Amino acid sequence: MKNQFEIQGDRTLIHVRYKVLYLNAWIDTKDLPLASSFPGTWVAEYSQTAQRYYIHGRLYANGTSKKVYLHRWLVSCPDDLVVDHIDGDSLNNLRSNLRTVTSAQNAQNKKLYTTNQSGVPGLTWDKAKGKWRVQFSINGKCKYFGSYFEFHDAEKVARDIYKNLPFHRENEQKRKKEKIITLFDFEYID
């Protein structure tokens, strides 16, 4: 069964199945011929690691199958690179939200770990020293930016460094202003 597409001007929704639900994923309407040319059906899967839904399909050849992700299919991503969803929404596959980057660059744009108690990227509590520690992974290397007794001092340093990282969430303000349909805008299957 092929997917249903709903054209809404320059954006198109792809209705993809996830268990007993349909999730909606966005693509650019100009990418509709490419997305619909996929020989199989696009479906959703939940990634426990990323805590997100991703859209994929399967290609079959010579008795084997290969998983193909929609975002990689749309940008023809080389095997040695990854596709970053700039706004962090893996169901938003608009070209303006996708960029091909290295794994290290992609790591700069990931959401906070669930264990992060500060709510600030790169800022953690160092229990042994009794201080707030500012530390980032940049180009695959861990960079240390000091420890601070006062939270607000450490927070200022961490936010200043984070906003200057080349691959942080550039579109955070845009995302707050523009409503993008996400997995919460799904339909139950009758």
Image (cartoon, grey):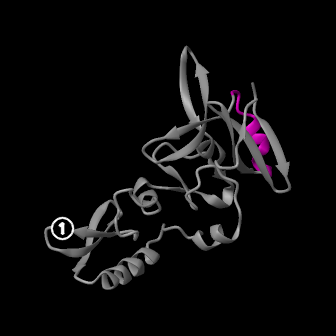
Task: Farthest residue to the top: give it.
Answer: 63
Query: On the rendered image, what quadrant is the C terminus found in?
Result: top right
Q: Which residues are magenta?
A: 29-40
Q: Name which residue lies at 82% across and 56% down.
A: 10
Q: Name which residue lies at 74% across and 42% down.
A: 14
Residue 102 percent location from the top left of the image: 45, 55
Magenta region includes residue 34: yes
- In this view of the protein, which residue sits in the foreground, 110 or 179? 179
Q: Name which residue lies at 76% across and 36% down.
A: 36
Magenta residues, dominant SS class: helix
- Residue indicated by mark 1: 127
Q: Secondary structure at mark 1?
A: loop
Tally of numbered tags: 1
- In this view of the protein, which residue sits in the foreground, 153 or 168? 153
* Label 1 Cα neighbours within 10 Å, binned few <14 / some 14-19 / many ≥20: few
Against 79, residue 162 (above or below) is below
Residue 118 percent location from the top left of the image: 35, 70
Q: Amino acid at mark 1?
A: Lys
Against 180, residue 55 (above or below) is above
187 with respect to 154 (left or right): right
